[in-house]
Image (tube, helix red, strand yellow):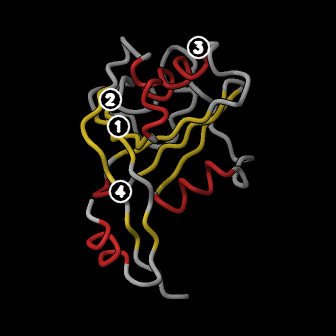
């Protein structure tokens, strides 16, 4: 986490992200689940969304991850993709005013059903949101460390 080391990794025109807590949980969906997961299983899951490409959360996920899929409903939105070393990563955003009503907890529970049972799912959370993870008993979300993502500048294509 030394600043000089991170600057060296990112290079002079690179980008250095913020320090985040790294959380992990296990997927709870059907084993062997692949592809578009919306509507799979016996109980409803979050609907796949194609109308949210301009949303800040979706644009950020696409800048950091591969194979990003977007899901959402009135509770908020979820992105699922492949991040560092190919690990499955998710992000959840609950609209202002919906926080504190349990929407984030139920949205996260449904997001975990989009991933095969037992497969680890990672999320980077700003330390200011760490209390959210503490309110997720039963979902078995654990803090396993911290990370900073440096990214070298990309050549124009």
Q: Position of residue 6 (x, y in %)?
A: 31, 69
- Circle 2 sits on which residue? 25
| Residue closer to the observer: 122 or 14 | 14
* Residue 24, numbered circle: none
Is 128 on the left or on the right of 74, as rendered? left
**Which image quadrant: the N terminus?**
bottom left
The quarter of the picture where residue 38 lies is: top right
Picture layout, residue 73 above or below residue 103: below
Residue position for label 4: 148
Q: Give me the C-alpha separation between circle 2 and circle 4.
A: 20 Å
Disc 1 residue crowd, few under 14, some 14–19, many 20+, Cα 10 Å: many
Between marks 3 and 2 in the image, the one whose residue lies nearer the viewer:
3
At label 4, counting other C-alpha atoms closer than 10 Å, the crowd grade (few under 14, some 14-19, many 20 or more) is: some
Q: Is residue 14 above or below residue 92?
A: below
Determine the CA span between mark 3 and mark 2.
18 Å
N-term-proximal mark, 4 vs 1: 1
* SS label for mark 3: loop
Q: Which one is in front, 83 or 12?
A: 12
CB of mark 3 within 8 Å of CB of mark 4? no
Going by the image, does 67 lie left or right of 21?
right
Nearest the eye: 17 or 122:
17
- Element at label 1: strand
Measure how far apart labels 4 and 1 are at the Cα level. Answer: 18 Å
Q: Earlier in the sequence, mark 3 or mark 2?
A: 2
The residue that disc 1 covers is 121
Name the residue carrying label 3: 102
State yes or no: discs 3 and 2 in contact (Cβ < 8 Å): no
Q: Earlier in the sequence, mark 3 or mark 1?
A: 3
Residue drawn 69% across and 47% down? 50
Mark 2 and mark 1 lie on one chain; the one further toward the N terminus is 2
State which tag comes first along the sequence, 3 or 4: 3
């Amino acid at each position: 986490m030394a600043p000089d080391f991170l600057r060296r990794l990112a290079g002079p025109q690179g980008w250095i992200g913020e320090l985040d807590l790294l959380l992990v949980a296990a997927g709870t969906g059907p084993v062997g689940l692949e592809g578009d997961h919306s509507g799979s299983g016996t109980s409803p899951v979050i609907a796949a969304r194609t109308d949210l490409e301009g949303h800040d959360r979706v644009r950020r996920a696409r800048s950091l991850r591969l194979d990003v899929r977007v899901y959402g409903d009135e509770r908020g939105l979820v992105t699922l993709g492949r991040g560092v070393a190919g690990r499955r990563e998710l992000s959840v955003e609950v609209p202002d005013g919906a926080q504190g009503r349990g929407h984030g907890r139920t949205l996260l529970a449904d997001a975990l059903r989009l991933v095969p049972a037992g497969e680890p799912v990672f999320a980077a959370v700003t330390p200011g949101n760490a209390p959210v993870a503490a309110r997720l008993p039963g979902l078995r979300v654990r803090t396993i460390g911290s990370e900073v993502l440096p990214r070298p500048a990309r050549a124009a294509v």
